[in-house]
Image (cartoon, grey):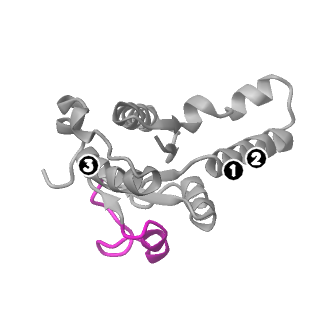
Amino acid sequence: MPRIYIAGPLFSEAELRYNLELDQFLVCLGFETFLPQRDGYRLSDLLEDGMTKSDALRVIFNRDLAEIQNCDILILIMDGRVPDEGACVELGYAYASMKECVGIKTDTRSLLSGLDNPLIIGALRNRIACNFQELGKHLRDIASKLTNVSMNYESVSADLINNSPRLDS
């Protein structure tokens, strides 16, 4: 099954919980994931271990780029008035590296009168899901193209799908 890099904000407790919920959904679909808050380096940990700030930032940057190179798909969490700037850099790198990119946006706010940034929309190839169920459909299509194998999407817990945030409710 393809590997997914989850790109999004990770600064508040709510963001961290949402990222974990999304990760759990993806794992239930059968994907392997890289979630930076869990699988990457934490700046505070590196600094506590005695690393200089510049070295720690370089280590995090290099690890995240390597993980994007090792993924097949990048998911951009777009919630907020604008997506997280670090996640946008990750999206740009993934897009330039010819990775499949998909957005999930459960938040109706936007910067441009109901529209998202055209560069973000373009990098996502207009694949922006408004809930986990829609995201699963995008991923099923991408996975079947990447692996020539049909995903067993229906086996995912109905609770995970039905309890995901929705724009249309």
Label 1 Cα neighbours within 10 Å, binned few <14 / some 14-19 / many ≥20:
few
- Image coordinates for residue 62, horizontal then vertical, percent: 76, 47
Q: Residue at x 65, y 51 (%)?
A: 69
Is there a contact, CB below 8 Å, between mark 1 and mark 2?
A: yes
SS state under label 1: helix
Find disc 3 in the rendering and name its residue: 131
Q: Which residues are magenta?
A: 107-126
Spot occupied by residue 161 in the image (x, y as percentages of width and height): 22, 38
For label 2, the residue is 62
Q: Name the side, left or right, on which 107 lies relative to 121.
A: left
Residue 102 in percent (x, y) is at 42, 58
Distance (Cα) linking label 3 and label 2: 31 Å
Is residue 152 rendered to the left or right of residue 59?
A: left
Residue occupied by mark 1: 65
Is 108 magenta? The answer is yes
Q: Residue at x 54, y 51 (%)?
A: 72
All told, the count of numbered labels is: 3
Q: Find the distance from the CA under tag 1 to the CA under tag 2.
A: 5 Å
The residue at 49%/35% (across/down) is 32
Q: Which mark is residue 106?
A: none
Label 3 neighbour load within 10 Å: few <14, some 14-19, many 20+: many
Farthest residue to the top: give it. 49
